[in-house]
Image: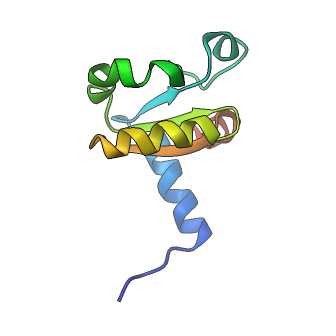
Amino acid sequence: MSQLCTTNELHMNIQDLINHVATTIVDVRTPREFMGGHVSGSVNIPLDEVAARIEELRSLQPMVLCCASGGRSGQAAEYLSKQGLDVTNGGGWHKVNAQKV
């Protein structure tokens, strides 16, 4: 029998991951968007460069991905997960930033 997580438990797991010392926050927005504001300490790898930079991304695991709203980071997370990478879609960068302590 599987266990269901409550929203608060899921939120805490993501928050713990975001704040874990080994986690890299990867922002998949364009460089221009990134320059307009981003999570402190995050790395900018635009969505259109993800496939070409797969080896670099392997070295950044585990990762939490973010973008403006979660759409692009969701696409990147799906692709990277299929490549066997340890990745979580954190959603919009403001949401990720709000969970950073």
Identify which residue is drawn at 46% across, 41% down: 77
Q: Residue at x 53, y 49 (%)?
A: 15
The quarter of the rendered structure image containing the C terminus is top right
Residue 96 seen from this side:
no
Front one among 86 and 51:
51
- Give coordinates of residue 52: x percent, y percent: 36, 18
Q: Nearer the viewer, residue 58 or 101?
A: 58
The residue drawn where x is 57% and y is 35% is 66
The image position of residue 39, as x and y in percent, is: 60, 26
Q: Relative to 53, is 10 above or below?
A: below
Q: Which quadrant of the structure image shows residue 60?
A: top left
Identity of the residue furthest to the bottom in this view:
1
The number of discs equals 0
Q: Is residue 77 visible?
A: yes
Residue 75 rendering spot, x and y as whole percentages:
52, 40
Direction from residue 7 to residue 15 in the image, left or right: left
Q: How is the image coloured?
A: rainbow
| Vertical comparison of 69 with 38: above or below | below
Q: Is residue 62 left or right of residue 94?
A: left
Quadrant assignment for the N terminus: bottom left
